[in-house]
Amino acid sequence: MSKSIVFLFIILNLSFNSVISQDLPDYQWWAEAHNWDGVTHWSRYIKRLPGYMGPNALPIPSVNDAKIKDNIYFESAFEYHKGRGEFAMNPFFNLNIPVANKKVSIDFIYRPFEYYETEEFIRQERYGRNRECKDIAKGDLYIGTFVQLLSEEYKALDAQLRIVLKTTTGKDLANGRHTDAPAYHFDLNLGKTIFENDGFLKKMNFYSMAGLYVWQMEFDNNRQNDAYLYGLRTDFLFKPLLFSCTFSGYSGYMKMRDKPMALRLTISKSIKNSFIFLSYQKGLRDVIEHSFRMGLNFSFNLHK
């Protein structure tokens, strides 16, 4: 009887292992393609650098308008990215809540997921492990605090300190879609009204950004990358249209596709207390070549 039980246990165990092995992906092709040494974990092959990852992994922060908004601000948009050997699309949400009489606000940016497709040479270049070269990846949540230092209403210009933390909600590091590691940036944003009148051009504003962008990596001799963050932006208001032109980027020290730079053009049309907008970003270096964002933003006061 005991021998029968042992024999049955062995048969069930072998059957179970067989079923499990069928469910496991076959990465033999990956090992052969990248001359895997049989020891190093695959994650050590992934370069957590903007030029070696998807467009939503380490995006360039926006140049802020340096002023805490009066009311709660919410933006809902759709993003489309197209460039060398890949494309991606994703929803985009931004919520900003003032909490201290226009002195402080809390900011949330969230891309819940992205759908992406890449060509094989991009997969090989990034050591990607998805043989099909397409999938859906969970996106990152950013949590920020804005602090108003100066107001143009009382001083010569607006000045705002911004501190933003990138959480680890973004996944699919295995295909270079997100870093699956924390990052942060803090920067000073300045704003100044150049002129304002009742003519054809209603208003012109100039903004600047300077700070530090830091994210984690997995190189043996470099556990993080520290980058200088910069940006310039000019707004032209032709009521009800607003044109915005931004030049921005950050510059890491590794000199391995870690110096993304981009030019962004945005046109917005006001509709009561909201704006409908279309934005185009041209990647100049170490960032996907073309990105579009289209959506709606509006503000509301919960106390009314």
Image: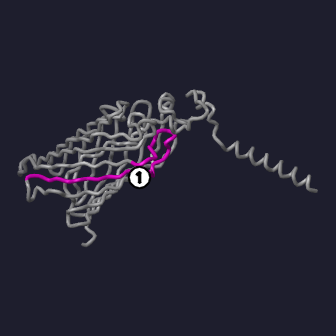
Q: Which residue is mark 1?
A: 167
**Quadrant of res 100:** bottom left
Compared with 254, 177 (above or below) is below
Q: Is residue 244 magenta?
A: no
Q: Does the rendering let one see residue 289?
A: no
Identify the element where label 1 is drawn: loop
Type of amino acid at the residue the image marks with label 1: Thr
Compared with 72, 42 (above or below) is above
* Residue sticking out furthest to the front: 221
Drawn side of residue 282 relative to residue 47, left or right: left
State the image coordinates of residue 9 (x, y, percent, origin top left).
83, 52
Compared with 299, 84 (above or below) is above
Camera-nearest residue between 190 and 82: 190
Q: Residue at x 48, y 47 (%)?
A: 171
Q: Does the rendering let one see residue 227?
A: yes
Q: Residue at x 58, y 32 (%)?
A: 30
**Quadrant of res 99:** bottom left
**Quadrant of res 229:** top left
* Residue sticking out furthest to the bottom: 303
Q: Residue at x 13, y 47 (%)?
A: 205
Looking at the rendered image, the quarter that the N terminus falls into is bottom right
Q: Residues within 10 Å of mark 1 (few under 14, many from 20)?
A: some
Q: Residue at x 70, y 42 (%)?
A: 22
Magenta segment boundaries in residue numbering: 156-182
State the image coordinates of residue 249 (x, y, percent, origin top left).
28, 38
Drawn side of residue 176 relative to residue 95, left or right: right
State the image coordinates of residue 177 (x, y, percent, origin top left).
46, 41
Camera-nearest residue between 153 and 149: 149
State the image coordinates of residue 299 (x, y, percent, origin top left).
26, 61
